[in-house]
Image (spheres, grey):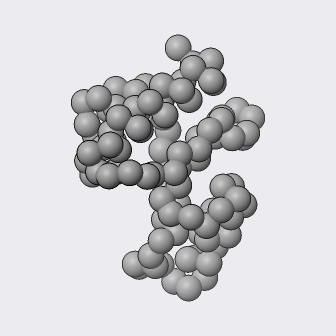
């Protein structure tokens, strides 16, 4: 998603205009300590109510309330269209212009 879908012309403008991205990597430790990884997993459970990956949660920056969530599914060729549809729904739901 981060390498192919987010920067694609179909969604990049929406991402730039309406999304402030904050990533919480919870699928692999990579360079994290055990404590950091456990903290990330706890944040994921607290914010998303799930430990499923990948899961994207849109949160209103003013209220902190969840606007919508997106669980990646289907094949790679479907992701861009699904993500664009999701972003458009979030923009409409949140009242952004």
* Residue 32 visible at all: yes
Looking at the rendered structure, the number of numbered marks drawn on it comes to 0
Q: Position of residue 93 (x, y in %)?
A: 62, 23
Q: Position of residue 40 (x, y in %)?
A: 59, 69
Residue nearer the viewer, 43 or 73: 73
Left or right placement of residue 15 versus residue 62 in this view = left
* Residue 16 visible at all: no
Q: Is residue 34 above or below residue 6?
A: below
Q: Residue at x 45, y 51 (%)?
A: 72
Q: Position of residue 42 (x, y in %)?
A: 67, 69
Which residue sits furthest bottom? 34
Q: Is residue 26 above or below residue 77?
A: below
Q: Is residue 91 above or below residue 50?
A: above
Q: Position of residue 34 (x, y in %)?
A: 56, 85
Q: Residue at x 56, y 64 (%)?
A: 52
Which residue sits furthest front? 74
Q: Residue at x 35, y 35 (%)?
A: 81
Q: Residue at x 53, y 45 (%)?
A: 70
């Amino acid at each position: 998603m981060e390498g192919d879908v987010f920067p694609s012309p179909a969604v990049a403008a929406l991402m730039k205009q309406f999304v402030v991205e904050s990533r919480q990597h919870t699928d692999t430790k990579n360079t994290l300590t055990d404590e950091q990884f456990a903290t990330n997993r706890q944040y994921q459970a607290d914010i998303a109510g799930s430990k499923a990956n990948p899961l994207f949660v849109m949160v209103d920056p003013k209220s902190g309330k969840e606007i919508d969530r997106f669980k990646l599914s289907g094949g790679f060729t479907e992701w861009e269209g699904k993500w664009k549809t999701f972003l458009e729904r979030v923009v409409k739901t949140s009242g952004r212009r």
